[in-house]
Image (cartoon, rainbow, N blue to C red):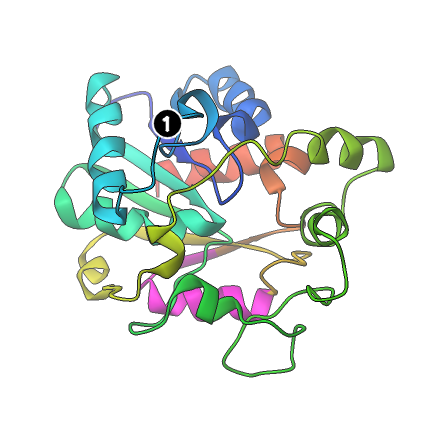
Amino acid sequence: MTSLPAFALLHGGGQGSWVWAETVRALEAQGARVLALDVPGCGVKRGQDVSALDTDAIATELLADIAAAGLSDVVLVGHSLAGAILPLMAAAVPKSFRRLVYLTCTAPLRGRSFLDQMGSGLHGENGDEVGWPVDPKTHPLEQRYRAMFCNDMTGKEAEAFLAKLGFDHWPTDVFLRTDWHYDHLEAIPSTYIICERDQSLPPAWQQRFATRLHCGHIVRIDAGHQAMNTQPDVLAGLLMAEAEA
């Protein structure tokens, strides 16, 4: 293993590499090498035509980004919807990653899409669906985002964060794909970080997803869904510890 850990950080849905800025600074302050990745259509890759891009192609492009950065023995960290991509990246090059770290990541069952897994009701209404913190049929998008992402932010922090949303667009195939595979993850060291105040993916569902992803280690952080924004120093400490686990 290298003396300094290397991290590749993958954002969640509707966000881009910009979401990791505070955590990148915190990791680099501890001597880590860090690459914040962008899914096509997001962050520095905004504006690309991604209409024909499938989930496998996304994984291939992200692996190429890591290789181009000259990183090896990487701790691959994913947030939220990135749980759909990390298993594909790991399947393609299973020995390239020191560890996979899932930060409040989703992991739909085989045969179900991400949209199926989330459902259309409220948290707890359907035991087979994650649900939403507010009714998506009666609450506009901004109110839904505020409830999902900003419950542990100050008012000023929430306004600044919400102003950055709406410009990053994941390829549609990620939301509609149903042929998920997780068994290969048993052989890869992995950690799931449960965000205990998450209003997007409740902790009980995070625990369920951690089991599906065959995570051998579970840690917890006292944060909402956007732990990289609200608790970047604590999160960086957890990631550094997992790099050496």
Q: Position of residue 175 (x, y in %)?
A: 40, 56
Q: What SS does tag 1 mark?
A: loop
11 magenta-colored: no
Is residue 213 depicted above or below 224 in this figure? below
Image side of residue 19 versus residue 4, left or right: right
Q: Quadrant of the C terminus?
A: top left
Is residue 220 shown to the viewer in this render? Answer: yes
The foreground one among 179 and 226 is 179
Is residue 94 shown to the viewer in this render? Answer: no
User: For the view shown, which residue lies furthest in the right direction?
Assistant: 155
Q: Position of residue 105 (x, y in %)?
A: 46, 54
The foreground one among 49 and 93 is 49
What's the residue at 54%, 18% (across, down)?
25
Is residue 182 depicted above or below 61 in this figure? below
What's the residue at 36%, 52% (across, down)?
174
215 magenta-colored: yes
Q: Position of residue 185 (x, y in %)?
A: 23, 58
Quarter residue 41 falls in = top left
Image side of residue 219 versus residue 87, left or right: right
Q: Residues within 10 Å of mark 1 (few under 14, many from 20)?
A: few
Circle 1 is placed at which residue position? 48
Q: Which residues are magenta?
A: 203-218
Image side of residue 38 versus residue 196, left or right: left
Q: How many marks?
A: 1
